[in-house]
Each structure stands twice: as structure tokens, then as C-alpha cells.
Image: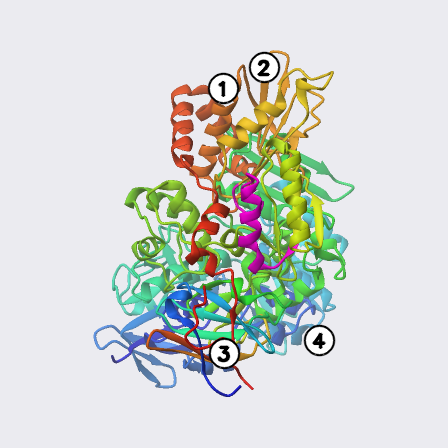
Amino acid sequence: MKKQKLVMVGNGMAGCRTLEELLKIAPDLYDITVFGAEPHGNYNRILLSPVLAGEMTLPDIVLNDFDWYRDNGITLHAGKKVEAIDRVRRTVTADDGTVAEYDRLLLATGSTPFIPPIPGNDLPGVLGYRDIADTEAMIAAAQAHKHAVVIGAGLLGLEAANGLKLRGMDVTVIHIGEWIMERQLDRVAAGMLQKALEDRGLKFLLSRHTEALVGGESGRVAAVRLKDGMTLPADLVVVAAGIRPATGLGESCGLHVNRGIVVSDTLQTVTDPRIYAVGECASHRGVAYGLVAPLFEQAKVCATHLAEFGIGRYSGSLTSTKLKVTGIDVFSAGDFSGGKDTEEIVLHDPAGGVYKKLVVKGDRLIGACLIGDTADGAWYFRLLKDQQDVREIRDHLMFGESSLGDTGHAGGNKAASMPDSAEVCGCNGVCKGTIVKAIRENGLFTVDEVKKHTKAASSCGSCTGLVEQILASTVGGAYKPTTAADKPVCGCTDLTHGAVRQAIRDKKYLSIADAQRGMGWRTPNGCATCRPALNYYLISTWPHEAIDDPQSRLINERAHANIQKDGTYSVVPRMWGGLTTPNELRAIADVADKYAVPTVKVTGGQRIDLLGIKKADLPAIWADLGEAGMVSGHAYGKSIRTVKTCVGDEHCRFGTQSSMRMGVALERMLFAMWSPHKVKLAVSGCPRNCAEAGIKDIGVIGVDSGWEIHIAGNGGIKTEVAQFLCKASSDEEVKQISGAFLQLYREEGFYLERTVHYVHRVGFEHVKQRIVDDLENRQALYERLLYALKDAPDPWAEHVADAAKKRNFIPIKLDMPATAETV
Amino acid sequence: MAHYQEICALEEIPRLGSRVVEAPHGDVAVFRTADDRVFALDDRCPHKGGPLSQGLVHGDRVACPLHNWLIELNSGEAVAPDQGCVRRHEARVDNGRVLLRIAE
């Protein structure tokens, strides 16, 4: 098939990101031609400010060098500005006469600085602040001249002023508004920022209007005259009075323009479906975005549409702002000014230079404005974006994510001030410097990309928050936070965990292949991330009907044993409620002798672990243990692990309830239960709580009048105390409530989400309503759990009895005759 | 061992799964893809020696069970950004039987 022709006009971040996304999913669909007015490849425009400030160099900020275009077969016309589009002939023409035909056209022309109509605005020495040429001109001016005036105290203006000051110029900022950055900051925050900048030697004139720019003898600008009569010397004037979408080209060929080129949710122009527009030049639902994160979201949607997938719609973005002036931290997002029905939580320490304002409406965070300490900006932004219920954490909201303890080890929320040598990821030994270097060198924008390149946060994940902060502070506004709720399951699909669960329920998919086909998976058979998740969703949604695919389970669940670092396995037989017998212990001892098991260890879950076993020995060991009546302990699964118990009133002089009996009953009920992640229970016979029920997924504690049930505790990476759910008066009621909660978690939890994170996501109230308040629903959940677990087989016994299953554990000997049976 | 040796029937390797073959130089993992092609690699991940045979097979790749490195089945190369390579061996299916030739 002949390739279609795609022409892109505008060689900036939004456009190139669209091409990258397109090449990822449909590398061979188009012959691509790119026109860029600047004589460069694509670079990170956001980082021009650090270049101006002398903290980075131009090569540092290149995202796609010329090799990238060549390697991807893209024809690049750098330094050629497109001047005309002929929509009838479907051609574009550049200023040097180059003509290119298109089947589809992508406009990514960005924006241009707005230069107010004041006399002298065309004098030499008067600049906008937009591209490499502007930046180079400013650097050159700083070497030759003394006085600089910046008109406009928005984000760009302040970054320009700071850079010029650092390059030795005497800088005055003139601003029309009553305070600086009025679109991002309130008056108090702006005052603090202004003071911090004044301390660095910048001068400000607020509520002033420029009347004219005055030329000197050389013809270059020499002074700025204000309406109140004041005149300032100026050898360089940087006009940063806002940007305007660059729509001239679109307008000239008849596209509908309203502030930007008007596009639909598929990023096609409303006038001509062959023409797309992304980035700052596009106007979507009345908004033209000037920040990077939304542009990337647009790029993704536009690419899927260009690839003819026809999926994905862009529905607008929420944006946040971060000022890139080294040493001064400013963050702002959402509605920071408040208003009717809103409340403000404010922390203000003028001496310490810290000001934090959070705007809350109902139970949601709707705006944040931070000065001085912005480490939690990314976290607030996530809360804002997700519209997360903050009622439960409102007390701690102001003190940041680390007050909830989520940022893990390595010192919490001071990402920006950490030294490069500080270890961020304790699992993989990754330091901050390595992460920053990878982000800069490879142009990374997401936590996932950082995980891939550095391995940081790719193991236990407890440092994800910290990695996120480092990313945010390194790439500034380009950072786009992602969360479990809106993140695709993996690279094979754009669907989220929630959407996948829903589709499996609605469409009744019963096999992984059907589910992947039905949901338009991009890969032929998924990957190591999505297959185990899909398998769990299928078998938990359609028990006894869906096909449980062993090849889609990770090795531990496939081998029904835990793989160890040297490739050997460990075997943990179940000991119901932590109880055992001489007969079982004898059988374990015999197995340890017979198979020369190097290590025998008592686990934290009150049972015995046999470590260092060869895979080929597993079926025989299971057979021996099975003869003594023992079954799989599922110590290897995203499944029920153990029910830990104390001695209870059968022996203990303090005991008030029979915790051993209760524990055994729960463990028997839950045998072979698969779940989104591992599940651990504990039962204590009295409030002294010797079974440590406070840090379990379900903790049951005996009191004189019955039992107390606590849920969603966790003793792992970060200790979380279980929350009190309700009381129960009988063993049967404990089973029912515990079972109903676990079924709710099984039905609603995302794969690899522990109960604590699940409850955190959906809210404790959500759980309480369904389990405690709604008795009918509790009963229904409990019955669905019992149905799913009905006749649950012991996987060990199944393997022992099935030659074909057992075969996979036995290696093939190479020297056997060609016709030998290998079973 | 420059010649092909028959190791088992194709059905004795699960689809999107593998079997381990004990060769003189060490274990070899023989993989079967969804479309019934077979590949053979040394059963040692170039990262920390994890047994690739125990990994999850998808497309023409296997994910190491220890730290999730992705290895290309047809070349033994780690998928970028990881770097490393594991030795590959010739494997093919002939008349429903899997043949393996251990590399010199």
C-alpha cells in the first residue's frame, strides 16, 4: 500500500511529541515531512530560562536532534517558514518556495509573544522571549550593555529578568497589575516572591503603564518612558506581556479561528478534518493552553487518531505552574483565589519565606499556591486533578504527603534540596544525581520513563513520591503527574484498570485472548504487566467460568512456590491459624532430610518455610507433604496468605475469646482465595493483641462482648494502622463481615493494590456503607465470595495428580534417545 | 555439539511458556510463542543470572522473573534501556517435534 503523506508545520514540543506518539503505534503509515521556522531540531522550550540564567547550555535542551529525524525517515525543512496552505490542492508552500503535498496536515505553530502597540516597539534591542534566537540575543546584549527593562511580570518575564540579572545586567521589571504573577499568585504570595527577587537585586515598578520606547543615537533602544512621566534607561527591552496563538497561517487558508485554531476533541480542525492542530496554536473548548503538560495529552490523542485507531478523546486539562528561578520555589494550580463556598487553609511564615495556601471546597482541594516550599506541589496537583476526597486527611493536608508517610525512606519531601549523592531508591541503589542526569539526557517526562531508565521506584515503589518530586523539580511545567486511577494498565492499552474491570464485567470476557481482542490491545498477547492483571480480573469477575491461564501468572503462582535469587524455590505448607501437629512436623522434618533442604525457617506468618529447593523436586515434596494431610500455604500468591492467631482463652489467662478457633475458621473459609494483592489476617483473643492484628488487611480482636474488626492495615513498606470498621457478636458474623470486605476488595481493587491503598482510593466511608450500613449488600458480597471459593482445589495436589502439569517442573535431559518419553 | 537433537514434542512446551533442557554447559530455556515458533537461550538473564525459563513470555520476548528485564527471544539481546545479551541456540519445529542445536 502506498504510504499517506503527513506534513507537520511547526517543529516544536507539541508537534514532535505527536510524531513520537504516532511512530510508536503506527511507524509505517505515513511519509512524514516537517517544516520548522527555526534552524534547529526540536528543543525543550521550557528550559530556555535555565539557559539564559547560565545553568544549562543549548545542547542540554535538545529533545530531537537531526539524527532523530533521519533515523525515523522524516524529511525535515529546518529554517523554512510555511507561508501558504492550499486546501484544495492539499499543498503547503514555504518562504523559499519549497512545496509539499499532504494527505493529512498537522499544524503545531505554537504562539508568538504579544508586543503591545506602543511607539518604538520595533527598535533594535526590543525582544520578545520565545525561542533560541531571542535567548541568544539576550545573552549577547547582556555582554555588551548595562540596563535592561522587562515589561510584564508573568512567569516568562520574571524568568527573563532573573536570567539577565544573573548575567550582570541592571534589571527593572515594569508591570501593569497591582502585584506580580497575578494569574498564578494571590497578593500575599506575590509580595513574598517580589521580596525574594528584590533581595537578588531586581527592581519592580507595579501599576505602571509603558508609554513609549525611545531610540538613542545609535538607533538602538535607549530608554523606556512611562505614562506617569518617569523615564528609565534601557539598552535591552524584553516584552513579556503574554503570548498569542500563532494562527495567521490557519486563518489565511480559511480555518475557523477563535483565539486559537478551533479543534474538536480529536484535535481535528472544525473546518477541515484533514487538518489537525495541537499545542499552543489550537483552541479546544474555548481554551488555548500555554503550558506543556496539556500539549502532551493532546499529542497522544492526536497520534491515535492519525494512526486511524479512532480511540481516545481529549477533554481538556487542568494545569499547574512552577517558576523556574533557581533557589525560589513557586507553585500554583487550580483556583487559588478562593471565593464563595470555599475555605482557605493558610500557613504563612514571612521570616522563613514560606507561604502555603490551600483552597478547599466541600471535601475537595480546588487550588494551591505555594512559595518557599513546593515539595508537595505534585501531590496537591494530583489531589486536585483526581478530585480526591480530602476530608480524612484534611488535618494533615497542609503538612504534605510525607506527613501521611507516603514518600518512603530517603528523607521525605525535600527533593529539591537533596544532594545529588543522596540515595533515592533503596531497592536498586539509585541516587538523586543519576535520576536528574537521566531526565536531562534522555528528555524524560513521566515517572514510568524514569523507572525504565534508572530502575528507581521500579521495585517496592515506596520512593515513587520522591522520584515524582525530583522529576517535577527538574522538568518544571512539563511534568505531567499520573495516578493509578487515570494511568493505563500498561503500554499495551490506553485503558485504565477501572475501565478494564468494567469491560470484563459488561462484555463478559472469559479468556485473556477475547478480552485483549475486544478491548483493542495493541500487542498480540500483552506483556508481563497486563497479562497477570487481566487473568486476575477474569477469574475474580467470572469465577468457575473464566479460563485461568497459568502462562499469564508470574512464576511464583505458576510454580506454586516462591522463586529465590539463585533460581531455587521455597515451600511453605499451610498451618491453619498457625496450629500444627507432631505428625505434620515429622513430615516436614522428613522432607527436609530426604531432599537435603538447606534452610528451614519459621516465617512471620506462623508457619514453616523450606528454602533452597530445586524446581524439579517440588512435585515430589508436595506429594510427601500431602500424604501427611498438608496443602499449599499460598505463600507465593496474590492471595490469602496467613491468619495469625494468639493463644486465646483456651490457654491464656487474659484471653476473652477463642482466637485460635476463629483464626482457623477464617483461614479455612478463605483457602485458595485469589485477590488483587496478598492478604493477611490476624485474630487476637483480647485487646492486648499479641497477634498484632493492627497491621493486617483484616485484624480481628476479641473483646468481652464479642469481636472488633479492623481493616486495611499494613506492616510492610510503610506501617499503616488498620481502621476500626465495626463490632461483631458471633464467629459467623466475623466470617460474614470479613468475607464481605474481602469480596468488595476482590471486585473493586486494582491488581497489585493492597487493601490499604484500595481503601485510601475509594474512601473508608465507601467501604463502611457497603459492609456495615447495607446488610443486604453485605450478605450478597459474602455469598459471592463463598460461591467463588466453592470447591477450591489444593494446587499442590492437582499437580501431583496430573502428569502434564507435573511435566513442566522436570528438565529435559539432552543426551536421551530421540524418541524417549520426557514425562 | 554441532547437530540438531530432538528434545520433545511441541505440545510438551506450553504456549507462551518454556521448558528447561539440561545441556553440558548448563541449562537452556526453550520457549514457544503464541504462533508455535520455538527459540532457545541460555537459561541465565544477563542481569543477575535469573532463570529466563521461568519468566512470562509475550510477543517474541520474555520478562525475567527476578527483575523484569525484557529479553528478545530471537537474538538474546536485552530490550533498551537495559543492556546485555544472552547466548542463543538454534531451535526449530519439525513434524511436531522440537529440535535443538547447542551453539559451539
> Is residue A560 placed above or below A11 in the rendered structure?
above
Q: Chain under label 1?
A: A
Q: Which mark is residue B75?
A: 3
Q: How busy is the neighbourhood of tag 1: few (under 14 within 10 Å), some, or many (20 plus)? A: some
Q: Which residue is mark 2?
A: A706
Q: What type is the residue that disc 4 sits on?
A: Gln
Image point (74%, 68%), residue name: A168
Q: Which portion, as a residue range, is magenta?
A: A612-639
Q: Secondary structure at mark 3?
A: loop
Outermost residue, top side: A705
Q: Amino acid at mark 2?
A: Gly
Residue A99 falls in image quadrant: bottom left
Amino acid type of disc 3?
A: Ser
Marks 3 and 4, Cα distance to the nearest angstrom?
55 Å
Determine if the magenta segment contains residue A237.
no
Q: State which chain disc 3 sits on.
A: B
* Sequence order check, earlier mark of 1 and 4: 4
**Residue at which label 4 appears:** A143
In whole angstroms, how far apart are the C-alphas of marks 1 and 2? 10 Å
- At x 49%, y 54%, the residue is A558
| Residue bearing mark 1 | A733
Left/right of residue A726 with respect to residue A19 in the rendered view: right
Q: Is residue A786 at all visible to an observer of this figure?
A: yes
Residue A629 in magenta stretch: yes
Residue A494 locus on image (x, y percent): 40, 55
Q: Quadrant of the N terminus of chain A?
A: bottom left
